[in-house]
Image (spheres, coloured by chain):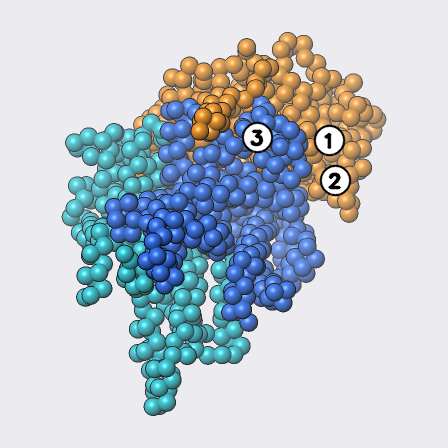
Amino acid sequence: MRLRAALLAALLFATPAAAQQRPLVWGDTLPATLDPHAVFDVPSQFILLNIYDGLYRYQGNPPQLIPWLAERHSVSEDGLTWEITLRDGVNFHDGSPMTAEDVVYSFRRLLAMNRAPAAAFTPVLKAENVSAPDARTVRFVLSTPYAPFLAAMPLVAIVNPRVLTANEKDSDRGAEWLAANSAGSGAYRMDSATYRPRTALDLVRFPEHFRGWADNPKPIDQVRSRPVMETSTRVLALLRGEIDATDSYLPTDQVERVERNARTRVAKDESMRVFILRMNNRKPPFDNKDARLCFAHAFNYPGFNEIILKGLVIRNPGPNPNNLWGNPEGMAPYSFDLAKAREHCDKARAAGAPLGREIEIHVQSELEQTVQAAQMFQADLRRVGVSLKIVPSTWPNITGSTGRPETTPDMWVHWVSAYFIDPENWIGQMYDSRFHGTWKASSWYQNQQVDALLAKARTSLDQSERARLYAEATKLVVADSPDIWVYNTVNLRGLTRRVQGYSFSPVGSGGELRTLSLAD
Amino acid sequence: MARYILRRILLALPALFGLVLLTFVLTRVIPADPAATLAGDAATPAQLAEIRARYGLDRPLWEQAVTHMRQVLSGDLGSSIFSGRPVMEEIVFRLPATLELTFVALLLATGLGVPLGLLAALNHNGPIDHLARLISVGGLAIASFWLAIMLQLIFAMDLDVLPLRGRIDVALGAPPTVTGFFLVDSLLAGRLDLLVDTLRHLALPAVTLCLPGLASIARFTRSGVLETLQKDFVLYAQAAGYGRVRLAAIYVLRNAVTVTVAQIGLLFGALISGAVAVEAIFDWPGLGTYAVQAILSADYKALLAVTLVVGVVYAVVNVLVDVAQALIDPRVAEQVK
Amino acid sequence: MTALRHLLRDPVAALGLALVLFAIVVALFAPWLAPYPEDAFESRLLQRLKPPSAEFPFGTDNLGRDILSRVILGTRSAVVVAVSVVLAAMLIGVPVGLWAGWREGWVSETLMRVTDVFLAVPQLILALALGQLMAPGLTTAMVALALTYWPFFARTVHAETRRLRGALFVDALAGIGASTPRILLLHVLPNAAPAILVRATIGMGFTILTAAILGFLGVGAAPPSPDWGLAVAEARQHLPEAWWFPTFPGLAILLLVLGFNLLGDGLRDVADPRLRRGR
């Protein structure tokens, strides 16, 4: 009996032998695949920033485009030929030096695979037009001038072709192998043996990283990425110190609690991630501008931003985030005004817009905020005599249906994150009709004037002209009210207090481990 | 006996074949277009078409089905179109986690369910019987995800005596993989600390998961004991002065195994179902979480494979159960003939 | 009537019956019983996440809605889901079981093999897959549950029919020229009824629970429905602060499922008198 009691006590209270310092445990989501050329989403940036290097990198907030593997660049006058000179003395994890040929290989691999991160380049760049005139120069010849070219550079990881060709299978460019392994030069290298997809990734510091470690005297040697699926579990795990960092979208209702805890804090950083309620402008009633204005005035912005999200977001009046260049000055956001909404709805009804039909709004049911916004909107729309039906769905289901206007939902809710820092990432890809059929352009907005402005801004190499063009386009788009822009995100990442040196940038959401250290 | 076993295995085959077909038909009518997710941001319609062609998503449905069948029969479950890795590989990583959890839960269910059922039967229609029934029926009525959250709050947060999530402490790390079962692997590695830590991590999810099983086992033990107590030979024995408790004890010793074995096959499905929610909440890296992720990302290859593997495991368990029953009680095999 | 008397003599089963009847009454009169019936769809942001008080005995949720009202209103959807899923499953499963149990031949054999296929996958996984495939929502979840539950009825009825087919009175009926449908509907089915009833009652509890899990995983009821499983799912982000948010809907699930299960258990005892003889 006593033995059993002792055993039970041992089971309940035995603390793990943790003599040395606990490694950093990162609780953010891992991407579905580790291949940096196969996906591009917020989780994949963690891999991109830590295991790999790109020619350029965004750092700081507001984000600065910093030459990373590149030393400098030059561009021909017609804006077509770009030459990038590589920095000397960069080594991959296997010790082999990085050459311009490796960069060419990486870009060709990216374009051949033609997956998410390639989308920014395929319209303007063919694989054969990437070349290496010498060991330190990479030349890109574009088919049309493309101003955001450099801004999109950080999307591309430079991979080690020697490792990949050794692991090639059916000439797949090592795709299957790289999904669970790495071939990079980044500040951390992964332990392939302990990798479990979406569950566990162990990282070890790469002391020979080209940037050196002078700026961080106490870098972290061991990092364990252990994603936590459930939000409630994730927060509890942080509070208990089982993980050192949550994802950067902590529910606003949990912020106070995490801040109150003696061992945790919340890093709050204004990001570039716009929360949007989409309207399908091709489907009645949304082909009617008054109907769209009615909806824009019926959303309770202060209620959602200030009360539900506790003021931890920033009202955003248009498609581009506030803190990006290219916004018109003094742009007034749509206000929550049910009287105005009613007025517009009456006008729309008089013009024959079918506001009496049940309008469907698709939400991403695993993202609670999209559901809350829809529920609140539903209650307010009811007051202006519009009935909204909430349809729970998922990202693949919705984006799978945005290929044609007939299959695109009446409305849906999502964010547009910072993939690259250029208005092209927001207004450019959202409201230029050439992108119709993609989820970003799923409001099916069409305005020839806007198309022309955006096309010009895309090809111009004059920054001040671009800013002017985007500002003009933004004014037109906002006046047409094709969508409901709600807020710009403040990223909220729960951290244990022992994590030092956290530095946030809208691309990567503060997932860069190189600058971090652990207090004792 | 050998013929019975063979027959039982052969009977399972058409069901599995149907399962392959069923899962395929199901998953290929998904409205979600995996190509759209794959191509990502700002993909052009031409890009989408190319991806569809590359993964054969543009072929007629029947043709995809035939290809699928051929692949499955040759043991190739394909690669996840999201992770790009063979689906089988991830299942091999994750199956032991789920099986370990289910097995411990089953053990708990039996260890607690049999005595509870016995107690109830001995107090038939008495207050303890009613209480035991309330408990056992209540076990079937609790929503596992709700209980899981409540247990987390109480034992991991308020009392701080048990870990919150995962299979093992992150700082300790997993034992070297031999079988994938941490309980076995930590013993093989001779690491008692890992064994204890694994058990601590198993405690909350296993308790949550065992409740429905506990309830069924208690219920079947109760009715089994009651039935035996009404048998003529027991009545004679009773008349001859044997105590009810002693009779019941003899009965239980002999029949608890049979009852439990018979139940395992049925329970296994419930356990796997329960595991989906329980694994999500306790962050258990098993098949349940994999299935949920596959569904959320419309990864139909993964979903197909999970359904199929669970179906196969389920079928194997049921065949084993039937065979075990036949071995314990040869009359079962006779009946089938 | 005797059956009812037996049932009522069994306190546990009587408790189950009481719980179920109570839920049905609440479901029928929900809009009149709920203190704030419009909280089914309203949002009152200024009073969100208030702990239980005299005004809101169960507290308020993330959109400031009265949880008591929503638990009461949710009873209706829970009962409707349970009853319609089980009825639909019976409509498929009972005829399949009758046919396959009565006739020999490849059709029967195929039917039972199809049943096996469905039984070879745990219901939740199948329902999850189905639910996701056909645009998630409560109707989809219900269809998915019915499609995964009918094999249980088919199995039960199949076994009963097989047993009765050899019975003397059935032979006699066939001998005096009764038609097959007549024998099946008027003689076999009533004899199988107790088994079906027990299955159905247990099935109700099972359905409510599985629907709740589906709602929890986002494949069930759509907001703003006052669905209980959905409420627990919505509450996750607000734990452990707003402990009342998942607790009361969770308890409601527990009580109603408990009611159905206890009733089913009691009915099983009534249907199988051997277990009642005792002592």
Residue C201, horizontal then vertical, whole percent: 31, 58
Q: Is the residue A145 above or below the residue A95 in the image?
A: below
Question: What residue appears at the point 29 percent right and 58 percent down from the top-left corner?
Answer: C278
User: What separation in Å lies between label 3 and label 2 (alpha carbons)?
Assistant: 38 Å
On-image quarter of the N terminus of chain B: bottom right
The answer to whether residue A508 of the structure is visible from this angle is no
Of residues A142 and B53, which is closer to you in this image?
A: B53
**Please, what is the three-letter code of the amino acid marked with disc 2?**
Gly
Quarter-wise, where is residue A260 in the image?
top left
* Chain A pictured colour: orange
Q: Chain of mark 2?
A: A
Q: Chain of mark 3?
A: B
User: What separation in Å lies between label 1 and label 3 (alpha carbons)?
Assistant: 35 Å
Disc 1 vs disc 3: which is toward the camera? 3
Q: Are marks 3 and 2 on the same chain?
A: no
Q: Is the residue B290 above or below the residue A497 in the image?
A: below
Pointer 1 local density, CA inside 10 Å: few below 14, some 14–19, many at least 20: many
Pointer 3 local density, CA inside 10 Å: few below 14, some 14–19, many at least 20: many
Residue C24, horizontal then vertical, whole percent: 22, 54
Q: Which mark is residue A183?
A: 1
Q: Which residue is mark 3?
A: B195
User: What separation in Å lies between label 1 and label 2 (alpha carbons)?
Assistant: 10 Å
Pointer 2 local density, CA inside 10 Å: few below 14, some 14–19, many at least 20: many
Q: Are marks 3 and 2 in contact (CB under 8 Å)?
A: no
* Chain C pictured colour: cyan
Q: Which mark is residue B86?
A: none
**Please, what is the three-letter code of the amino acid marked with disc 1?**
Ala
Disc 3 vs disc 2: which is toward the camera? 3
Q: Secondary structure at mark 1?
A: loop
